[in-house]
Image (cartoon, rainbow, N blue to C red):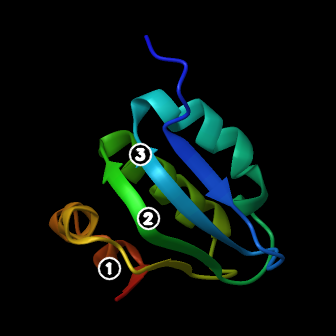
Amino acid sequence: MSSQVALTIERDGDERAARLIGELDLASYDQAMEEMSWAFGGEGDIEFDLSQLTFMDSTGVRLLIQIRNSLEGRGTLILSSPPPNVEKVLRLIGMEELGIQLRP
């Protein structure tokens, strides 16, 4: 098993936004849960820039749904600039029907 970091989460001052870089999957799930704990609850929209996310599996999808559910109507989860392979996964599972907004 590799010790190489497969996921980087960058925040740039906006307390409700982050950029996801690398792979959001089973191998990075625990790290992502810890580093994204700020996204659970609170007030207002949360935006993730996915432009540098190279891969996402069902575990990553589950994490995004958990974050969206934690908002309980106090904001919207916005996923911006997903690359084509990630956007395809998001559209196949119906993220927009789940109340998660996709922005090109």
| On screen, residue 24 above or below 40 | above
Mark 3 and mark 2: span between their CA atoms? Answer: 9 Å
Q: Earlier in the sequence, mark 3 or mark 2?
A: 3
Q: Which residue is mark 2?
A: 52
Q: Earlier in the sequence, mark 3 or mark 1?
A: 3
- Residue at the top extreme of this rendering: 1
Which residue is found at the position 32% from the left and 50% from the top? 55
Which secondary structure lies at badge 1?
Answer: helix
Determine whether, in the image, residue 79 is placed left or right of residue 35. Answer: left
Which secondary structure lies at badge 3?
Answer: strand
Q: Position of residue 65 (x, y in %)?
A: 46, 58
The answer to which quarter of the image holds residue 16 is: bottom right
Which residue is found at the position 45% from the left and 50% from the top? 22
Q: Amino acid at mark 3?
A: Glu
Q: What's the mark number on residue 69?
A: none
Q: Are marks 3 and 1 in contact (CB under 8 Å)?
A: no
Crowd around label 2: few <14 · some 14–19 · many ≥20 (10 Å): some
Crowd around label 3: few <14 · some 14–19 · many ≥20 (10 Å): many
| On screen, residue 12 above or below 7 | below
Q: Earlier in the sequence, mark 1 or mark 2?
A: 2
Q: Which residue is mark 3?
A: 23
Which secondary structure lies at badge 2?
Answer: strand
Q: Position of residue 86 (x, y in %)?
A: 27, 63
Q: Quadrant of the N terminus?
A: top left
Q: Position of residue 73 (x, y in %)?
A: 62, 79
- Is 83 in front, or is 67? 83
- Residue at the bottom extreme of this rendering: 104
Q: Position of residue 43 (x, y in %)?
A: 79, 79
Q: Which residue is mark 1?
A: 96
Q: Amino acid at mark 1?
A: Glu
Determine whether, in the image, residue 76 is placed left or right of residue 61. Answer: right
